[in-house]
Image (tube, rainbow, N blue to C red):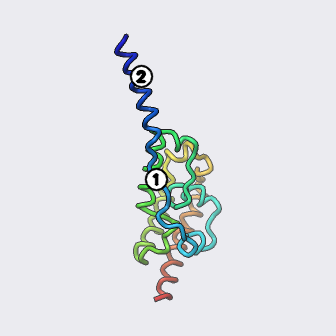
Amino acid sequence: MKRLKWALYILAALLVLIQFYQPDITPRTTDTANSDLLRTIPGAPSYLRGACYDCHSNESKLPWYGYVNPVGILVRNHIIEARKHLNFSVIQDYPTEKKVKKLNECAEEIRDGEMPLQSYTWMHHDAQLSDEQRNELSHWFETAAAAALARDMNNQ
């Protein structure tokens, strides 16, 4: 019984100490006026921000549990990894080929139901997309890829 008591004390102390570790999700760049996808390619469905931007942009809004570790560490690391893969806040700064590829991948991931992640939609019901919304968003990403390619080709 004494060992269990000490194990619980140690576990409690670790839970308190782990609260001091907060992975930084502050964006590296703050000037996104000319780089943000929604500002540069009009016509995006209104639910794009709720379904994608919390992880794939510099505009992440942590839910309350994002501040409580160890869950908070997982959430913040997920955001860091998502931004490494695709960051809508700076997507216009990507090279043309990468930008078009990423936008087309978005269309495919949305169409196939791979994004938004199911684990995300469990806690964020506004990110759950109907089949109609998936089709609309997928089509918009394809259109955005074509528009980005056309704009970059005209600017060269």
Position of residue 122 measured from the top left corner of the image (x, y, whole percent): 55, 43
Q: Residue furthest top?
A: 1
The answer to whether 54 appears left or right of 11 in the picture is right
Label whose residue precedes the other's in the sequence (2 or 1): 2
The answer to whether 17 appears left or right of 39 in the picture is left
Mark 1 = which residue?
A: 24
Q: Residue at x 45, y 89 (%)?
A: 156
In this view, 135 is above or below 95: above
Q: Which residue is drawn at 57% across and 68% down?
A: 140
Q: Residue furthest left?
A: 3
Position of residue 95 measured from the top left corner of the image (x, y, whole percent): 41, 76
Position of residue 93 measured from the top left corner of the image (x, y, whole percent): 46, 74
- Of the residues shown, which amino acid type is indicated by label 1? Asp
The answer to whether 3 appears left or right of 147 in the picture is left
- Of the residues shown, which amino acid type is indicated by label 2? Tyr
Mark 2 = which residue?
A: 9
Crowdedness of circle 1 by 10 Å Cα count: few (<14), some, many (20+)? Answer: few
Position of residue 36 measured from the top left corner of the image (x, y, whole percent): 55, 70
Question: Residue 131 or 115: which is nearer the viewer?
Answer: 115
Res. 34 visible in picture: yes
Name the element at disc 1: loop
The Cα atoms of the two marked residues, 2 and 1, are separated by 29 Å
Name the element at disc 2: helix
Q: Residue at x 49, y 55 (%)?
A: 115
Crowdedness of circle 2 by 10 Å Cα count: few (<14), some, many (20+)? Answer: few
